[in-house]
Amino acid sequence: MTSGLTRRDFVATTVGTTVALGAATQAPPPLAASRELAPIYDEIERRHDETVARLQEWIRQPSIAAEDLGMREGAELTKKLALDAGFQHAEIIPTKGAPGVFATLDAGARQTLGLYFMYDVKQVDAAEWSSPPWEGRLVEKEGLGTILVGRAATNQKGPQAALLAALHAIRAAGRKPPVNLVLVAEGEEEIGSPNFGQVVHDTPQVRRALERSIGIFMPSHSQDRDGTVTIRLGSKGDIECELVASGERWGRGPTRDVHSSLAARLDQPAWHLVQALDTLVTPAGEPAIDGFFEHVRPVTKEEHAMLDILARRTDEKSTLESVGAKVWARNASWRQALEDYVSRPTLTIEGLVGGYTGPGGKTVQPHRMTAKLDMRLVPDMTPEDIMAKLAAHLAKRGFGDIEIVKNGGFNYVSSTPATSKLVLAQRRVYQQFGIDAMLLPRSGGSWPGSLFTAAPLSLPAGHFGLGYGERAHAPDEFCLIDSRNKNLHGMNDMVRSCVDYLFALA
Amino acid sequence: MTSGLTRRDFVATTVGTTVALGAATQAPPPLAASRELAPIYDEIERRHDETVARLQEWIRQPSIAAEDLGMREGAELTKKLALDAGFQHAEIIPTKGAPGVFATLDAGARQTLGLYFMYDVKQVDAAEWSSPPWEGRLVEKEGLGTILVGRAATNQKGPQAALLAALHAIRAAGRKPPVNLVLVAEGEEEIGSPNFGQVVHDTPQVRRALERSIGIFMPSHSQDRDGTVTIRLGSKGDIECELVASGERWGRGPTRDVHSSLAARLDQPAWHLVQALDTLVTPAGEPAIDGFFEHVRPVTKEEHAMLDILARRTDEKSTLESVGAKVWARNASWRQALEDYVSRPTLTIEGLVGGYTGPGGKTVQPHRMTAKLDMRLVPDMTPEDIMAKLAAHLAKRGFGDIEIVKNGGFNYVSSTPATSKLVLAQRRVYQQFGIDAMLLPRSGGSWPGSLFTAAPLSLPAGHFGLGYGERAHAPDEFCLIDSRNKNLHGMNDMVRSCVDYLFALA
């Protein structure tokens, strides 16, 4: 049902207008042309095939947290790749789930920078792929150039391999990295990072190393199809949970599935759930959980400025088309729809499931019915507060028997200032490539950013990297290796952008 | 989810009290002891193994309408079995779906009786069976005796094989059946008999033959586990349909599944469906479709008398336990719960399905959500009227975009008078075996009875037969062959009850 979904949850298409930026969104001055990096750039070109081969090697090792497949091997390979790239120290960090990896590269530099990697990948159904998902085959693609097809090509081994290639190129050119590096990698990103806090908060040597860092970033293919880049200054918090109505908990209706004719004399847990769900939204479909909006912080002046720019420079029509929609919720304007995306908390039904779910009908009365919910939180909401409010709301209305089960994400809002060095340096690097990056106050998608941005670490955190990929989580995931599209950068430029970024931060 | 469900939707357990019956429920006088049938009974005993072998042969031919598997072969075998049993004429009747079978046995008798067979069976998952589902293995079972395990052992080849064995025994004893017979068999009972009307109404020779009949019955294992028999004087009507909310039809929200973060700016078809569903029931979970109860006929005096007897002679506690419930809907008494079962129309959620339905969560916003509904109708409701009322109800409340899709049963109420010859003869035969059969005004389960009881045929119709089976539709379906349980009758008595019934009707 959900194939084709990607991590790229924010879809924006430039209309080609360059607009003056205001306030905190003022464009920073460009970097001085860095002649001194030319030998490194030469090494990037020379080592192109080696870089691709390294990515293919990584792709050939599937590590699927959801299936507990190849986790140990994935961690070991990540450790090896770090050591190969010049990290002097690398170790496996055990957790209650899949292990993490911690590595440090002491370049004798003044500044220390954090790197966040994931070595796990989404599941595959190989039958749906046009080439084997664990091969990383190079293929020509109309309108793009040479692409590499494989699971994790863009999410996230492709961009991570580019960062490693940058370190190889720097060393090959006889240079040292301009910053010290602290790498933390996890193997459970695709299942909501349930144990990554154990790696970054609870492991003393990791926490100490991160505390010394100026910030942390995850290498990413940040270009959209038209070449634009939007820097996300954080992400919403999120909660995934199930509401489960059952005869057992309710004390009414059957406690096993029975023939539907018996509904004449048995209460129905399914209707009980429908009635409970109905209380959670207004007639317009907005969240109606008691107190849901209590702590919502108004949109700031800076955020308004960023949204004004996004509204002018991005295309409403193609964004509507990308989801097959005719109108935005509340018949909002494009500017308002952008603001809603970053500032409205949500309550979403991910799925309903229970009773007979196959083709046609089946005369059964189910004893149990489940709604899978997803909530997206904005500053200053917290998952704990909202979970408590949901439970109180249901109990107050006679639905206290309905079970609330956490089943996925449970993340705090993550925020990084537009004025942080991490963000300013990103914008300067993109500018060198002729890209005037836009700023998005926060993404609605989730990543474990709050583990870095919230206490105890309180670090700037984000994503960075040129380049382009598609179909994360879907069949035929790919990344662009050699671009023949004037708007899009291939692997070598992605590696070069990593080099530039490290030097810009130094 | 629904394994263990059986066609035996009415569960009742005698408490052992024999009660005087009132009004139309007055017990008829017993049959004169029929010495003249002794040679036939002898043939039944002698042919026991042949009868079992014939049932096994039938079971070895799977015919699964839902999978379009073995339908032609099933029809041909049914035709052959009829000819073997003495029908002079048998033919396949094509339909838009699986073919029917029509056969006649002219015994030169005064009366003609209809027989309704089904040759299709439910699907199997052989891995869930303790012996192969298509074998019909004889197995010893504690507390029962020798049972035959196989798909259709009780639903419905076992009882039908007993009727055929009765004809073989009558012929072997040098007698003719005491009534002429008209057999109609279908191959789509398990998918709601969508084309059986073409066989019994639209095929001139079949319709003429049925019009000459005094009534029609389906052989059945009619005993409950405690040996009691409850004769159902008809069945509720039923409708199965889906309500489907989608971005496409609504014109709001996405038209494909998208990332759940986008719910901040996209309407949700899932909430639209929940809100529509909520209008269909009262806060107590009762149907609230406008006009739903308009044509409901009050319970008659006769029906009240039958329910009084059922309430006295059946056990509430074990019936509650059989569905794992603590209380009846509306906290009804047992007497009221019985009345509700026969007289309340229902609106049931068979299942909810849409979006992500697997384990855990998945951050998706579905563009489509489905509720599978089942409605049970009582006199004088009709499926057409209720479907129209459902559509009008939704449209009036702003849910006119929600699609209503028929997906299963669509049957009229079926009714046969307690005073019909068919029913009176049944009760006399059961009495000969010491069983004071109870009368149930109607079952909540569906069978295509209204094709016989409603115009144009307007025939009495029902089920008949001693004997016992379990696990229809479930793994390890079985019927009792040689009983060592004092309350339950095995195959030979089932065959004998068929012989007695034919002679009682003559």
Image (cartoon, coloured by chain):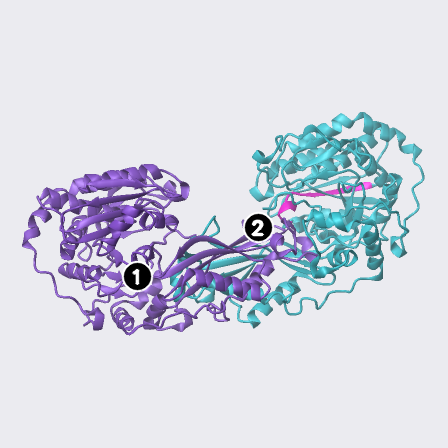
Chain colours: A purple, B cyan
Q: Is residue B183 magenta?
A: yes
Name the residue carrying label 1.
Answer: A234
Q: CB atoms at circles 2 and 1 under 8 Å apart?
A: no
Q: Where's the C terminus of chain A, which quadrant? A: bottom left
Viewer-closest of A293 and B166: A293
Label 2 packing within 10 angstroms: few (<14), some (14-19), many (20+): many
Question: Looking at the image, which residue is at 91% across and 48% down?
Answer: B28
Compared with residue A179, is residue A230 higher up or lower down, i.e. above or below? below
Question: Looking at the image, which residue is at 58% across and 66% down?
Answer: A397
Mark number displayed over residue A356:
2
Compared with residue A96, is residue A502 higher up or lower down, i.e. above or below? below
Q: Secondary structure at mark 2?
A: loop
Position in image of residue B242 (x %, y %): 56, 57
* Residue B412 seen in render: no
Magenta segment: B180-192
Instruction: Name the chain letter of the residue that bears numbered label 2.
Output: A
* Residue B432 seen in render: yes
Label 1 packing within 10 angstroms: few (<14), some (14-19), many (20+): many
In the image, taking residue A403 as reference, residue A347 lies left or right, namely: left
Work out whether mark 2 precedes mark 1 in sequence or the reverse, and give the earlier one: 1
Q: Amino acid at mark 1?
A: Gly
Viewer-closest of B42 and A355: A355
Q: Secondary structure at mark 1?
A: strand
Viewer-closest of A389 and B248: A389
Q: Is residue B140 magenta?
A: no
